[in-house]
Each structure stands twice: as structure tokens, then as C-alpha cells.
Amino acid sequence: MSDKKAVELTIAIAVLLVSFMMVFMSRYVRLESHTAFTSDGGLLFLHENVDLPGLITQLREANVDFDDAHLYWAADIKQWSSFRAGRYVLPMNSNYDALLSKLARGEQDPFMARIVGGQDVNSFIARTARLFRFSEDDLRQTMTDTIFLADIEIPEHILIGRMLPNTYEMFWTTTPEQFVRRMLREFDVAVTQRYSERAAELGISIDEAVTLGSIIEWEVRHVDEKRKVSGLYWNRLNNRWRLQADPTVAHALGERRRLFNRDYRIDHPYNTYRIFGLPPGPINNPRLTSVTAALYPEQHNYFFMVASADGSGYHTFTTRYEDHRRESRRWSNWLTEQTRIREAREREELQQGS
């Protein structure tokens, strides 16, 4: 080989090596670059484990910007080929290694799950399922599964009362069973361990306290009135009156509306206009303030109450039935007047629009 050809070959090899090194260094820098992925800082939900092509599709749908070829190269270098289901907070900027390793290891980000109070079983299941990966059917099946209920030693009709309202840090992929067990642990710490002795002093169980608390939860709009309403219910119970709590009738009917005389005659184990004592179980998941109100009732002599005729959401309390009837008429008249005003307003708006 002539010297000239040897030089040309050396130059060609050098050029190839330089080009290779430039490409390699470019990709390596890209691998560690904090702008390899750019996004608007949203969320990525992987409903199931996915491979790299599946991940790319999900990232595109989440408006993440990246280079496909570089991503394949980076995944091959780091040997990430499968990415785990979960809820992930996407950073505004990230390198390939940080994001891919996070998704491959399933290091999902927790979220604050807000459990709302005063929900019956159906509302609770529907609202809770919207927070997690599991479906309504999944959660309902768990909450009615006889084997699971036997394991946790809680009857189905009692379980809803222990779904204590609060905000909890959880993972989106939490299973229904994991969720229920977590809620029971929270209830045990917040209620059972703290108030069992107080319940025993009153001669009731924790579940009975929760049942009364659930009625208070439904009945009372303002927290500062809960202990007063509790005192009224305790006055009735201690004097062997029927509880006569409208929320239990609404629960028996399966709808929340204004009650009529015929409704109070419904034959149902939760209708406290027909049964003595507390109903068999809670009618919703009461807040802690309602449970503690049930355990620490206000001391007074009231036996009757009716919604105040001012729209405030409070109640008017009386000791005598005659006074109660008078206040009930005031409430009924106020309600009729409000209906008249609303209908007149609607007619006026209809005329203005025509």
C-alpha cells in the first residue's frame, strides 16, 4: 500500500472514529441531560405494565416531548424494557435515566385521597372508585365478600360506618382490599382506641356510637349543633321513646328528600319511627365530630326539634310537643313561602326570556 493510500485510510478511520465518538457523546450527554424529557408537569397514569412502545404511546398522550430514537437507545443502554403500572408526577424536565428507572421500578407518587363524610354505601363506592385504579365493582365486591368480611370480623352493614372521613396519603394502584384494611386501621386509631372506654361508660358499643353518629351526620349541617342534637336523641333513648329520626326513614326509602306522612309508615328495620332503639347499623360514614358528639351529648331537656324557619340550617328545640307543633307549622309555612317565591321568580325569568 502506498504512503498516500495509507494516509487516506488513516484519515478515513479517524473521521469515522470522531463521528462515532461525537454521536456517542451526543447520546450520552442526552442520556444525562435534564432536558431529554420535557413536559407541562402533569400526571402519567399507567393502568397496567407496559413495554417500551407502549410507554412511548402513553408519554405522547401525556404531552411529553422527547426523541424516539434516543429513547430506544437509552432504554437499551440501561436495559429498561418493562414499566410498571402506577400514577406518576411528570417533572417539567428530566433525563432518560431518571424517568425510565422511576417507571421501571414502579416508584409511583402517592396522592392525597379525600374520603368525604355522610355517604351511604353506594355513594361511597362510586366516589372512592374515582380516586383509584380499581372500579366500583371491584370495591363493592370486596365490601360484600363474605370471606373477606369474616377475616376482618366486621359485618357488611357495619363496614360503611368505619370508612372514617379524612384525607389520606395513598397510592393510586392500591387494591380494594388494601384500601379497606387501611381505612380500618385509621378508624381503630382515631376512634376505637380513643373512645372505647367512653362508649362503655354510656353502655353502648363503638359501632352503636358510630350508628348514632351517622344519624347526627345526616341530620346536622353545622358542627356546633351536633352535641345538642345528640343530647336530644339520648333523651329519647334514655326515656324509652322511639328515636324518630327522619334520616333513618330517608335511608330506608333509599333517597334524600322531603318526607311525607306515608313515608313514616314504611316497614323497614331502619325506620326509627317504628322500631325502638338504634337501627341495626350506620346509615353513612360519619365524620369524627359526629361520632364524638354521639359519645359526648349536650345535657339539656329537649325532646323535639324542627328545622328553623329562617333557612339557616339550624334547628329549633323544644321540650313540649305543643311547642314543637307550633314550630313545625312555622317551618312548613316558611317552606311554602320559599316555594312560592321560587316559582314566581322562575315565571318572571321565563317571561323575560320569551
Image (cartoon, helix red, strand yellow):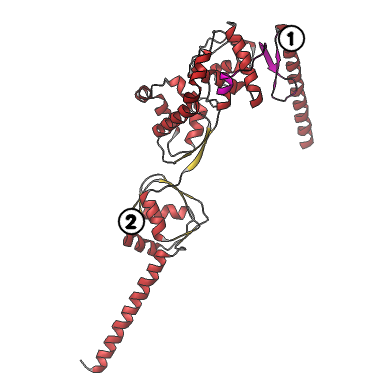
Instruction: Give the left or right position of residue 151, taking residue 210 as reference.
Output: left
Residue 173 seen in the current view: yes
Percent across and percent down for residue 162 are: 48, 25
Q: Magenta part of the protein: which range?
A: 291-319
Could you classify mark 1 by the number of other residues whose Cα lies within 10 Å: few (under 14), some (14-19), or many (20 or more)? Answer: some
Percent across and percent down for residue 257 are: 62, 21
Please name the residue that numbered disc 2 is placed on.
Answer: 80
Query: Callout 1, which amino acid?
Result: Asp
Percent across and percent down for residue 120 are: 52, 25
Residue depicted at 50% across the width and 25% down the height: 194
Q: Is residue 254 above or below residue 239?
A: below
In terms of sequence position, does the residue under pointer 2 or pointer 1 come before the other? 2
Label drawn at residue 323: 1
Q: Is residue 316 above or below residue 26?
A: above
Query: Callout 2, which amino acid?
Result: Trp
Provide the secondary structure element on which disc 1 rests. helix
Magenta stretch: residue 223 in it?
Answer: no
Instruction: Give the left or right position of residue 67, taking residue 345 as reference.
Output: left
Residue depicted at 41% across the width and 33% down the height: 176
In what quadrant of the picture does the N terminus appear? bottom left
